[in-house]
Image (cartoon, coloured by chain):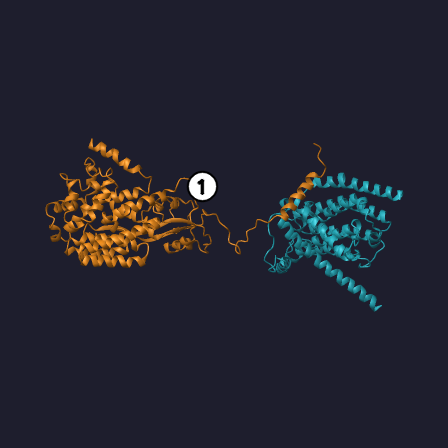
Amino acid sequence: MARIPGEGLAKGLAVTLKHMVRKSVTQQYPEVHPDLPPRSRGVIALVEENCTVCMLCARECPDWCIYIDSHKETLPAPEGGRPRARNVLDRFAIDFSLCMYCGICVEVCPFDALFWAPEFEYAEYDIRDLLHEKDRLGEWVESVPPPPPHEVGAEPPKEAAAAASRPARGPAGHTGGEPAGAEPAGPGRSRAEGAGGAGRSSETARPGAAAGSGPAEAAAVPGAAEAGAPTETSEAAAGTDQPGAEGGTRAAAGRAGADRGTRARREAPRGPAAIRAIRPPGALPQRPSAPGGPGPSETPETSRPPGPSETPESPEASGPPGAPEPPRPPEPSRPSEPSRPPEASGTAGPSGEAEREPAESPGADSADSTEGGPAGREAPARRESPRALRNVRSIRPPGSLPKKDAPPDQGGDA
Amino acid sequence: MVSEVLDIAVRLVVIVVVFLALPLVVGQMEHKAMAHMQSRLGPMYAGRFHGWAQLIADGVKFVQKEDVIPAAADRRVFALAPAVALVPYLVVLVVIPVGPGLFGVDLDAGLFFVLAVMGVGVLGAIMAGWASANKYSMLGGMRAAAQLVSYELPLVLAASSVAMAAGTLSLNGIVEQWRWWWLPWQAIGGVVFFVAGLAELRRPPFDMPIAESEIIMGPMTEYTGLRFALFMLAEYAGIVVLSALTTVLFLGGWHGPLLPGPVWTLLKVLALAFVVIWVRVSYPRLREDQLQKLAWVGLVPLALLQLALTGVVKLAL
């Protein structure tokens, strides 16, 4: 191949000429905002409502640039059970002068509270001003882009599957497992107190009121507008008789269910909050069984009688247990008792008494308004807790956890 | 008498205005063309519309800067060097014909005058390199001198070929003699003249004297502010003068269909200026030995070939 002299020179000239005619690649940034891809790591946004102060992000952060302060608030159990503690987020700050944008916090957050936002114009003149508090982190949530759609033919997203399965269990969890539902939400707390106080005089009305307060919160979280109606109904129900109260709860529960269907993500924090009440998963259900050795399976039934008014609910309450029967075994499994005592040092004592009390004297609750009452409610609360747990599990690899639980239980039984 | 003086005055004013305006146009063209060749946008802010006022802004900036003269410098030579670099190009413009009858002065030995004065322009760089009391400046000055010596020969040979063809040294006369078939006839000479002229201007890819990656800025290393701006202006004025000379000698000056003569001259000058920029963007800098080799092994024989060709054809006609 004979090369024409000057061929390379001509080629060089052709290249530059081609580039001159082509569109230049310059981004006129301050005038024209860059078109960033949806997964741009600009800044970390915080959805404050979703945060449960689990501290996972702060612990996993390689730079230790996340600062979280919180305090515990105890809520009197709506149904007259043991007062529940929940974490309230006081401060959530990220020091972007330390952050290396690894995204581990976003990945590790189990409750969808942290997101990448494509915002990047937050430079400061002083490095100390790069410490951004939760209000500033919350502002960035608005710029979080919707997740990119799945590829055609891809598996349906896990979240969608979880959302589809949740509504079926959700309402049951709320009506049957009131305590689990009653705990988390902030706005409903005061109402639950009020309802509990009102209902304490008439025990029969209490469950209904509590049931009302649960869904009321469910509605209160998504929208304040909806919050008004359910609370009124629940308060009214607390004052009057149960059928009305239950009607209110039904309506509220229905509404909550509808909400759940539409905003599955909003609902998410609820499940996790309920988990916290259960803390060591799989362990708590056994707690009632530990002291009430003779009748572990009976205690729930004995504790239920105090609320004969629950009869309309009981089908629902018993309905879910029917479905999730397999996970129930944890209750009868006693062999794991030894592990319990250290944990249950503070709470197990009262709860143990409480369980016996309702079993022996259902009426004693009213006399022991402070101690016995709430404790008496605890038994069903705990019994119900596995159900809430199951809700949570449906978020994770579905179906895997019950299996995991089952083998130890069987081993224990064996 | 008065009308003569007025005539000369008007011509000089026009020449000075052109001398000040055209280098800016070329400079702006270089900014934008080079930017787009590199897939950039170039200046976009100064003057609001695509940075048309960028060079004016640059000039204002240069004026504001401190005028630093190194303590060890030969002060008078140092201060004089930018003027020596710039003025010759202004003087050359005087004799370049723009259209029929449109020229500053019609010298009989116009071509000789032009080549001689352009050689003086290089002296500015040598003076600057010597006077700066800086080793890099010194190296740059020596390189500029070596380049001048090497490339002056093919430049003069190529130009003499045209003078032979036209039978005159007057630039005006050369353009009047020009016929379209001179284009292929003098093509080799034209290329040699243009390339040698580029080297004389120390434009990339022949910018070994100011190779910033090895000797900072060559002779201009110690220059700041307005003096540095004058050097830059001299460079762009040099581009204008070289393009104008190539136009006049090899491309037929004002000859061209449809459009009036001066417009043709201007178009050709700007096209050649674009080529200067284009070549600058496209090619990497030649090494010092490649630079010398190109002159002595490439351009001088080619210029001699052109000279022979011109002589043969001239005799045959």
Coordinates of residue A269 in the picture (x, y in percent):
31, 49
Camera sees residue A363: yes
What amino acid is at disc 1?
Val
Residue A162 or B269: which is nearer the viewer?
A: A162
Camera sees residue B153: no
Residue A326 as seen in the image, left or right of residue B21: left
Residue B182 as seen in the image, left or right of residue A256: right
Q: Is residue B55 above or below residue A100?
A: below
Badge 1: how crowded within 10 Å, few (<14), some, or many (20+)?
A: few
Name the tint of chain A in the rendering: orange
Position of the C terminus of chain B by quadrant: top right
Q: Which chain is cyan?
A: B
Describe the element under mark 1 as helix, strand or loop: loop
User: What chain is tagged by disc 1?
Assistant: A
Residue B6 or B144: which is nearer the viewer?
A: B6
Coordinates of residue A39 in the picture (x, y in percent):
45, 46
Q: Is residue A129 above or below residue A332?
A: below
Q: Is residue B25 above or below residue B280?
A: below
Say which residue label 1 marks: A152
